[in-house]
Image: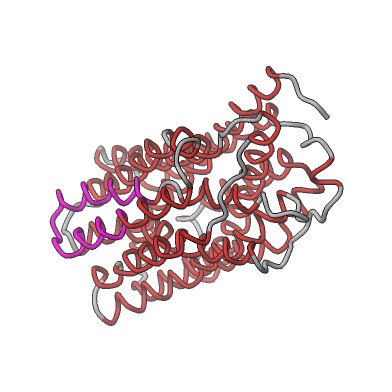
């Protein structure tokens, strides 16, 4: 069905808020991973198992996320994902022990992937229906949310607000805000794309598989930064948790700025070039950070890494929706399933490497993943013109 410009504009604003909400939750979680580690007395190896539980929930959910989005619609699935994420994270310091924490992380991961697929499906539909690029802008709002969540946690930690109170308040606000914003999203995406093709999970193959593998490399690098950067700055660089959380905020802020410029750049330059240059810059920046081990070098390097990884998700998610014969939701779920496999491999890999060597050495995974992404950028299909 055709949509008027005011309806599309309202939907874009609502979807921006949803991307920001997801980013706030991700930033809050990243900033409080040291809080979880300290509260439950976890070693780095055990912490990696907790992160792995979230990744398993994420990947499992992706097998049916496309079907849920097809049944409930993007806005119904968004509301469900936001509420479940907020409940699981808001109580993350309240569980009676490790088994309950692992169960909650499964729920958290499953809800986050449903939320992710739903809002990316909505964003792709808005780009198609509106006839102009919006995906980089939307992913920029995710990064703004990540910066906001981490910066807020840094400030609240610095003034002595208890972590459990922070988590209750932030997650409660996000749940309510997302529930209000969901009313502005599209009621449906217009029939043709979703009704004529499968709306459930599609096994990646051919071009869809190639795009998924590139997302795997990019999300491995980005995910490691989200999960381990604050702990790295605190333990290996010697910063306080409050200051270390600012490193996460800087990474997300730089990513946001680069993504807000991304739609302009995508309209003027080849996407392969943008991916290659960005991923290469991220690899070099993180190599310098890890070699120097200096707080100021780390902050600057995190900014360059964030800017360099910024084009990955907007370009590759949208490229997946251009594969013929697969619905938007199914295509995004398919390639994201491979991408989130990086979150499954990353936590135990980083935890194991950190236990055997150091967290500094383990974070070399970011350098390797970024370099592989830069090398594989030539396989990304260029968008249609005209």
The part of the image, by quadrant, that contains residue 325 is bottom right
Q: Is residue 291 magenta?
A: yes
Give the x, y percent position of residue 146.
Answer: 42, 43
Give the x, y percent position of residue 217.
Answer: 46, 64
Residue 177 position (above or below residue 200): above
- The residue lying at 37 percent from left, 47 percent from top is 163
Type of secondary structure dominating the magenta stretch = helix
- The residue lying at 36 percent from left, 74 percent from top is 351
Image side of residue 194 versus residue 117, left or right: right
Relative to the observer, which residue lies in front, 302 or 3?
Answer: 3
Q: Hey, which residue is sitting farthest top in the picture?
A: 6
Residue 88 position (above or below residue 44): above
Give the x, y percent position of residue 197.
Answer: 83, 53
Q: Is residue 36 magenta?
A: no
- The residue lying at 74 percent from left, 48 percent from top is 69
- The residue lying at 83 percent from left, 41 percent from top is 192
Q: Hey, which residue is sitting farthest right in the picture?
A: 196
Image quadrant holding the N terminus, namely top right
Image quadrant holding the C terminus, namely top right
Relative to the observer, which residue lies in front, 380 or 334?
Answer: 380
| Magenta-colored span | 281-308
Q: Hey, which residue is sitting farthest front in the picture?
A: 386
Image side of residue 196 versus residue 370, left or right: right
Q: How many marks?
A: 0
Q: How is the image coloured?
A: secondary structure
Residue 137 position (above or below residue 46): above
Image side of residue 8 versus residue 362, left or right: right
Give the x, y percent position of residue 78.
Answer: 67, 42
């Amino acid at each position: 069905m055709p949509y008027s410009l005011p309806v599309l504009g309202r939907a874009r604003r609502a979807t921006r808020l949803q991307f920001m909400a997801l980013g706030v939750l991700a930033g809050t979680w990243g900033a409080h991973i040291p809080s979880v580690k300290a509260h439950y007395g976890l070693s780095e190896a055990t912490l990696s198992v907790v992160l792995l539980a979230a990744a398993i929930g994420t990947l499992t959910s992706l097998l049916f996320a496309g079907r849920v989005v097809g049944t409930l619609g993007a806005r119904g699935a968004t509301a469900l994902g936001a509420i479940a994420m907020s409940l699981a994270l808001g109580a993350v310091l309240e569980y009676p022990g490790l088994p309950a924490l692992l169960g909650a992380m499964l729920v958290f991961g499953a809800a986050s992937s449903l939320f992710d697929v739903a809002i990316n499906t909505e964003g792709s539909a808005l780009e198609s229906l509106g006839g102009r690029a919006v995906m980089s802008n939307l992913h920029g709002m995710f990064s703004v949310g990540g910066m906001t969540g981490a910066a807020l946690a840094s400030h609240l930690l610095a003034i002595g607000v208890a972590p459990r109170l922070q988590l209750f308040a932030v997650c409660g606000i996000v749940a309510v805000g997302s529930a209000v914003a969901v009313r502005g999203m599209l009621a449906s995406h217009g029939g043709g794309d979703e009704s004529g093709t499968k709306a459930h999970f599609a096994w990646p193959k051919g071009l869809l598989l190639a795009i998924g593998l590139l997302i795997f490399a990019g999300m491995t690098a980005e995910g490691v930064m989200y999960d381990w950067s604050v702990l790295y700055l605190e333990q290996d660089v010697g910063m306080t948790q409050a200051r270390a959380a600012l490193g996460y905020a800087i990474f997300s802020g730089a990513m946001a700025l680069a993504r807000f410029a991304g739609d302009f750049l995508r309209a003027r330059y080849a996407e392969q070039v943008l991916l290659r240059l960005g991923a290469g810059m991220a690899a070099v920046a993180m190599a310098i950070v890890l070699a120097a081990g200096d707080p100021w070098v780390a902050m600057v390097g995190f900014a360059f890494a964030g800017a360099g990884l910024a084009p990955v998700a907007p370009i590759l998610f949208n490229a997946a929706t251009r594969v013929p014969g697969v619905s938007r939701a199914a295509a995004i779920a398919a390639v994201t399933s491979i991408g989130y496999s990086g979150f499954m491999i990353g936590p135990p890999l980083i935890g194991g490497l950190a236990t055997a060597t150091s967290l500094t050495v383990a974070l070399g995974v970011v350098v390797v993943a970024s370099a592989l992404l830069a090398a594989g950028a030539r396989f990304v299909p260029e968008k249609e013109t005209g």
